[in-house]
Each structure stands twice: as structure tokens, then as C-alpha cells.
Image (spheres, grey):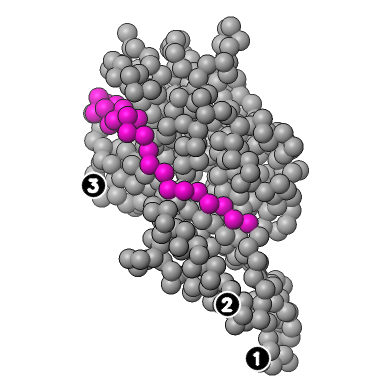
Amino acid sequence: MTETLISPPATSLRIDGGRLLRRIRELGSIGVDPATGGITRPGFGPADQEARTYLIGQARAAGLTAGVDAAGNVIMRRPLPDDSAGQRTAVLMGSHLDTVVNGGPLDGAYGVLAALEVLQCCAEAGLETPYEPVAVGFANEEGALFPQPFWGSMALAGRLDALPGEPADHHGRPLRKALEEAGGNLDALGTAAWSPGSVAAYLELHIEQGPVLERAGTQIGVVEAITGRAVLTLRIQGSAGHSGTTPMEGRRDAMVAAALVVVAAESISGGQDLCRVATVGHLDAYPNTPNTIAGAVTLTVDLRDTDPVRLRSAEEAMRGALRRIADRTGTGITVTALTRSEPVATHAPLRAAIALSSEELGLSHLPLPSGAGHDAQVVADIAPIAMIFVPSIGGVSHVPEEDTHPEHLVGGANVLLHTVLRTLGHTPQ
Ligand code: GLV
Ligand code: MN
Ligand code: MN
């Protein structure tokens, strides 16, 4: 890997910016809510399936091959005349196709479409490279509907033991059928795994989702490390009852317990000895009606830190708080799903390749950490990884206003192209 990175870089090859921006617009119309302008394309929902179909259609129309693996990931390649696809070590690039509820058009989609654009660019230029460029659209990175974030990248990285056997969504509906409709197969999940030697590098281009690049007036971010994360999905079981006739004493109110969980999460975050951030972003109460005590609540607690020890202590502290809250409220609290991803450092030679590519393209760059989770941190189990960030207008993401200036989107994709060319060992003419 290291020696290929010193290959001569400067090339006049550029991505087709107009084509990339058109695809971003088109994909951004799938799952859009006309009332809010936000995009709701949770993994394995109908809009996500539409997005998968759109991506495959674009890739095939470009003369590339595109298919869905057992986990629902879209895998795109150049057709090779000698039918040797998959025989060579790959340089993987991509991101995720799904969104949060009422999110924006760029989180994930930008990185997938830029990967497709780079692949198409390599194909059109007829580049012969020692490694094979492969683009991927990962399934269910967000976990908005099925609470298994990083689903697709975990399968690709072979982390099957960490995935539930029969995953279900927040309403208890099984993933099995939705996955099948997407072209996947729960019983064959192992076939989606790539072996460590099969991937030379994984590169992910993404919007920053924070304010650092915009404030600094810098065009490219070179990610140094990606935050670790533990997401606990909880079910609080109480007793439903009449809100007017049930005395306060002896109630088993799941909503009161949920409120205490929200406060407990806040109290273990933010301080110096605590985890960096903690969020309860999803909460469902049953039966969710004004004059009935909540009999049950499901909610998620999302804990993040770049230090693995602090992250573990925060999870332990949260579990302790849950036991105390259950005792105090007479409710039963169970963790029904848990996803952990460790903080991950990016690969120094790949970071250097991104910095060099930016400089050659006349783009300023700076190193920064990622507070958001990314498929890259999972793929890091089997390959060296790196991430390229572009500025987010107003520093916002996971909201309909999420946006990036077109010249930054195109610039970032060119940095991806040039970094991939270096990584592929291609020597430009
Ligand atoms: C992924 O989008 C995350 O929540 O960081
Ligand atoms: Mn996201
Ligand atoms: Mn993302």
C-alpha cells in the first residue's frame, strides 16, 4: 500500500461535475416530504428500495455492473473483458444510501454517487490499474427504522456475530422480508463478507455535518479519527391504567421511567470525565394517549466518544442508571438491541494521499476528527481506511436544510478520484 501512494499523481482527469450534481438532485427527490423538504429514506423502507433501484439503473446505464449482496448493499464494478471481476484486490469507495427521518439529501448519498462517478470516470478513461476500483452503497447505516446501524458494512466486514439472527424494526417487524425485497438474503449473510486481504483500502467521501471547515474557510477535511458509538435500544415495561382514577402511589408509569432515562443520559455526557455526547433521539410510548398511563415505552440511547475507555464507562454508567430507574419506578427495563462501534483512527499514508491530491487540485485542507459515525469505521476491521470531508453550509446535518455548495461537492469528488488513482497504483500519462 505505502509504495503505491508515492506513484506520480498529477493528472488532467476530472470527474463530470454536472453528472454528479444531477444524480444528487435525482436521488434527493426519493423519499422527500413536500411539506418539510426533508428526506425520509430509512434503511429497508420503500423509499430506500427506490433509491437502490435508481442507483443500480444509473450504474448499468453507464456500462458498469451493479448488483445487491446478501446484506442489501449495492456493489458496482467495471465490467472486465476477461471476466476477472472480483479476482483482484479492490480499492473500495462508497457510503450509505439510507437517511434518518426528515434528513437531508447529502448524508451518505453524496459519497455513494461520488464513488459511482469516480468508477465511471475510471471506466471511461480506460484505466488499467493493479487494483480494482469498486463502488458500494451500504445498506442501513443510520438504523432509523431497523435499529442495527452499520448493518451493511458490518456484514461486508464479516462482523456477523455482532448482528442479531432475526433483526426486527422498532415496531417488531422482521427484517427478513424487507431484506429479501431489496435483493438480499438473511440466510446467506455470510456471502456478503469480504476477506481482509481482498481490500487494499476503503475511501469514504462525506459532508462534514459540522461547522469546522466552513468556519475555517477550508475546502477539504482530512479525517484523523472517527468517534466510537454505543446505541442501546430499550423497552420499558410498566402498567397502563386510567390517568384519572389510578392513584399516584403504586403506579408503574413507563413514561416517568423514560423521562428519567433521558435525564440520566444527559447527566453522563458533556463533562470532563464523562462521555462526549449522549442522545435520546427516538421514543415511542404505548398506547400514547392523553388519559392513559403509558404501559410501555421504547427508546434509544446513543453514546459517543473517541476514547474507547470513556465510552465503555459511559455505557456501564448508563446500565447502572437503568437499574436504579427500574427499581424506583417499578418498571422493567430491557436492552432489546445494542450496537457498538469502536473509535477508529484513519490510515496515515491514505491521509497523506488525500492532502497531496487536494494540494494538486488547488484545494485547501485541514485535519479534523469525525463526531458522526461512518461505515468506514466498520470497514476498518478488514482494510486501511480514510475519509474526505467537504464543508456543510451552516454546519448542519440530519435536517432538511443540510446542504453543501456545488463547487465543494465537485471539488471533494475530484479529491476522491485523485486519491483513488494514487491508491490504485495508477501512473497517469
Ligand atoms: C450517522 O449518521 C451518525 O449518526 O453518526
Ligand atoms: Mn447520518
Ligand atoms: Mn452518513
Q: Is residue 350 left or right of residue 363?
A: right
C-alpha distance separating marks 3 and 2 = 44 Å
Task: Tell me the amino acid under the disc marked 2.
Answer: Ile
Q: Earlier in the sequence, mark 1 or mark 2?
A: 1
C-alpha distance separating marks 1 and 2 = 17 Å
Q: Badge 1, how many Cα within 10 Å: few under 14, some, many 20+?
A: few
Q: Residue at 51% across / 56% down in the picture?
A: 230
Q: Which of 145 and 307 is in front in this view?
A: 307
Q: Which residue corresponds to mark 3?
A: 216
Q: Which of marks 3 and 1 is nearer the N terminus?
A: 3
Residue 330 falls in image quadrant: bottom right
Q: Badge 3, how many Cα within 10 Å: few under 14, some, many 20+?
A: few
Q: Which residue corresponds to mark 1?
A: 248
Q: Which residue corresponds to mark 2?
A: 325
Helix, strand or loop at disc 3? Answer: helix
Task: Tell me the amino acid under the disc marked 3.
Answer: Ala
